[in-house]
Amino acid sequence: MPTKEERREALKQVYRQAQGCVRCPQLAATRRTVVFGSGHADADLMFVGEAPGRHEDEQGVPFVGQAGQLLDRLLAEIGLTRADVFVVNTLKCRPPGNRDPHPAEIENCQEYLLRQLELIRPRVVCTLGNFATKLLRGDPVGITRLHGREEVRTIGPLTVRLYPLFHPAAALYTPANVEVLRRDFGRIPELLALPEPPQPEGAEPAPVAEPVPEPPPAAVVGEAAAAAEQLGLW
Ligand code: URA
């Protein structure tokens, strides 16, 4: 089993790899930043949203707009801050006009998410909304039926407690759903207090794929490194 430091180093490598990603030509052409994720790289709790919006694309950090403010408030209500958790998205690049992610984009991007999961090793993973929930459960059942019901799931080499929640942006459209989301959030401390679910036999993170495709220009690497420091990865 790799040490914490080895996992952190591997995560930085995945971060660098994602910065130059051109797997989705339209997203690579229209994005300003690749929004890798932010927070505590050894967090017990991870949130998986949908995709960056305009503000996230500008700042390179997930959930910084209105939905992010609601996420921060709900975290504060259970005694947590963004520095205690790791927040990522299903897609690392903003879909133009905030359209829904296309299936091919989700497929192209999922390797980054799976690597984040196996290198951060959260015990509880909250999927926010339909896209993250369907992807990580590998099943088309929607969030309306699943929210607030935790289940033990093995995702790649990691077994976690998966806890689907309404997406904060969707909840903002329907005030009653903010209360549902708040109630579901209220159970997160209880889930974090449960013992770690048993891990599959011999599960080890795979080595990071080398070489890095399409390395970004040096200036971008510099900027990305500064951003990664801000994100808590370095
Ligand atoms: N919605 C998301 O799913 N992710 C973000 O980062 C912002 C809004």
Image: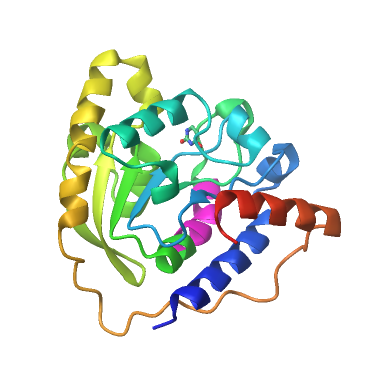
Q: Main secondary structure of the magenta part?
A: helix
* Residue 18 on image: x %, y %: 63, 57
User: In the rendered view, would you say 7 is above or below 114?
Assistant: below
* Residue 2 on image: x %, y %: 44, 81
Residue plotted at (28% across, 60% down):
123
The magenta stretch is 104-114
Q: Nearer the viewer, residue 135 or 234?
A: 234
On screen, residue 114 versus residue 161, left or right, reads right
Can you say which quadrant of the picture contains the N terminus?
bottom left
Residue plotted at (17% across, 41% down):
187
Q: Nearer the viewer, residue 60 or 108?
A: 60
Does residue 21 appear anywhere in the picture?
no
User: Among all residues in the image, which is located at the extreme front?
Assistant: 79
Q: Hey, which quadrant is residue 128 in on the image?
A: top left
Q: Nearer the viewer, residue 140 or 165?
A: 165
* Residue 188 on image: x %, y %: 22, 44
* The stretch drawn in magenta includes residue 108: yes
Does residue 38 appear anywhere in the picture?
yes
Q: Hey, which quadrant is residue 225 in on the image?
A: bottom right
Can you say which quadrant of the picture contains the C terminus?
bottom right
User: Among all residues in the image, which is located at the extreme right?
Assistant: 218
